[in-house]
Amino acid sequence: MDLIDSHAHVDFPQFDDDRHAVIERAQAMGLVGLVNVGTNVQSSRASVGLAERHDFIYATVGIHPHEAETATGEALDGLRALARHPKAVAIGEIGLDYYRDYAPRAAQRRAFQDQLALASDLDLPVVIHSRDAHDDVLTILSNWEGTGVLHTYAGGTERLDRVLAMGFCIGISGPVTYAKAEQLRRVARDVPLDRLLIETDCPYLTPEPHRGKRNEPTYVRFVAQAVAKARGDSVQQIARATTENARRLFGFPRLY
């Protein structure tokens, strides 16, 4: 069964002791694509490096809202250079986070809009982080012409039509497996099959039955299983659709 983990952070320190083994397990399990997502200039550079070394890994480059104050002109120039790499497939992850508020909200909005402009300049999709900031995120995106994915979607069913009308994909991750995540399973059911992506966000958001441990790309299969059950589809249908959706959104070659 071919799967793509459309959002991972295998460059993070949690994988320093066994990164190669984690990547080998992912391929052995049947992962045909992995999108490793940058969160600052250094992480974006590491993501591109991973993509250079592994055929099935692709990179995104971006500055996470937690680090919005680092989105200087120099940093954005660095992202622009990295984004020209042939295996850089998106700008992200970018967006707003009003839950942690690690950066001032004005700085977050400025960094978000600057990186959306960068994506437009380079004709790349975006990977959006939105936590407790959904309405502001959607307002900003409504004034931007482009496409992408709202990763680890948490905007509820009430915003789903608006997101889909803007042409965005919906990324579903490990919480869909949690016992109390009925609303997220309703989202997974209601998203059109051609707009659905599955992801791990590893090393975070580990799905059942491994919740509480480090997440890794092989666990995307548990997300696929939970989404299939919520929709009444087969796991094979979910695998085929989400693999094709990721290929189309990120523009990498057909993988199966």
Image: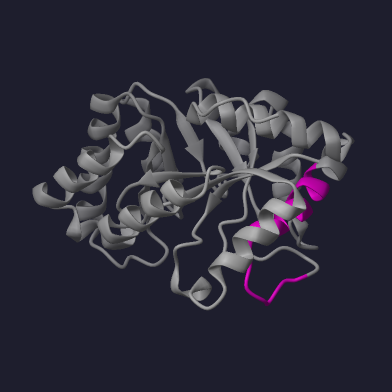
Question: From what the image shows, is residue 136 above or below residue 253?
Answer: below
Is residue 156 shown left or right of residue 38? right
Q: Residue furthest left?
A: 73
Residue that appears at 54% across and 68% down = 19
Q: Position of residue 127 (x, y in %)?
A: 44, 41
Q: Would you say residue 226 sits in the magenta stretch? A: yes
Q: Is there any visible trace of residue 94 in the rendered image?
A: yes
Question: From what the image shows, is residue 241 above or below residue 78?
Answer: above
Question: From what the image shows, is residue 80 above or below residue 250?
Answer: below
Q: Position of residue 136 (x, y in %)?
A: 36, 42
Viewer-closest of 163 and 92:
92
Viewer-closest of 256 and 135:
256
Is residue 158 shown left or right of residue 61? right
Is residue 75 shown left or right of residue 8? left
Position of the C terminus by quadrant = top right
Q: Would you say residue 224 sits in the magenta stretch? A: yes
Q: Position of residue 70 (x, y in %)?
A: 18, 59
Q: Position of residue 158 (x, y in %)?
A: 60, 37
Residue that appears at 62% across and 55% down = 200
Position of the N terminus by quadrant = top right
Label tally:
0
Viewer-closest of 86 and 10:
86
Residue that appears at 75% across and 39% down = 2
Residue that appears at 37% across and 33% down = 86
In the image, the segment drawn in magenta is 210-227
Name the magenta segment's main secondary structure: helix
Question: From what the image shows, is residue 212 above or below residue 144?
Answer: below
Q: What is the basis of the colouring in this image?
A: one colour
Q: Is there any visible trace of residue 162 in the rendered image?
A: no
